[in-house]
Amino acid sequence: MSVNIHEYASFLPEIAESLPKGAFLTTKDADKTNTMTIGWGSFGFEWGMPTAEVMVRESRFTKIAMDKNDCFTITFPLDDSMKSALAFCGQKSGRDTDKIKDCGLTVVPAKEVDAPVIACKGIVLECKTKARLPMNDKQTSGEILDKWYKSGDLHTFYFAEVVACYRID
């Protein structure tokens, strides 16, 4: 599916407003579906395509699926109905709990990728990973390292093509 660039661009203001409140990054690895909360990312156009860039810490359970598979989804809730689920999914690990079950979340099949979508009123991006870039502390400013990485648990950046974008009401 080719994403309409104008349609994708029309979602960017709502995505920018919603992201600091949290979004669900959802992956699937074999039969295991996992979601985590993200609050950082970049969305725009690179390599002649609409793109999403997300960051996952090296220690996160989600990183295993992100490295094994080439797809994920991002669901941006547009109301406060997912606030407690976002908080839970940002604090708990999929290694220790089934966050989707524990939060009573519903997943639905994505339109274009294998990873499912969290069903809620929101905007969905379906993504196919095109590049992975681990952070390098020697190439990152000391100010950033001191503020966000005192533990040394750096991120890997995942650059993905947005292959579908739509609203769920």
Image: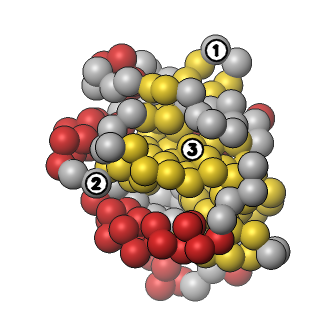
How crowded pointer 1 is (Cα within 10 Å; few <14, some 14-19, many 20+) is rated as: few
The residue to which callout 2 is attached is 78
The reply to whether callout 3 and callout 2 are in contact (CB within 8 Å) is no
**Which is more toward the observer, 25 or 107?**
107
**Which is more toward the observer, 44 or 35?**
44
Q: Residue at x 56, y 27 (%)?
A: 109
How crowded pointer 3 is (Cα within 10 Å; few <14, some 14-19, many 20+) is rated as: many
The reply to whether callout 1 and callout 2 are in contact (CB within 8 Å) is no
Which element is circle 3 on? strand
- What separation in Å lies between label 1 and label 2 (alpha carbons)? 28 Å
The answer to whether residue 66 is left or right of residue 37 is right
Badge 1 amino acid:
Asp
Q: Position of residue 77 (x, y in %)?
A: 32, 49
Badge 3 amino acid:
Thr
The answer to whether residue 101 is left or right of residue 152 is left
**Which is more toward the observer, 75 or 11?**
11
| Relative vertical location of residue 145 with respect to residue 87 in this rendering, above or below | below
How crowded pointer 2 is (Cα within 10 Å; few <14, some 14-19, many 20+) is rated as: many
The residue to which callout 3 is attached is 73
Which element is circle 2 on? loop
Q: Position of residue 79 (x, y in %)?
A: 21, 51
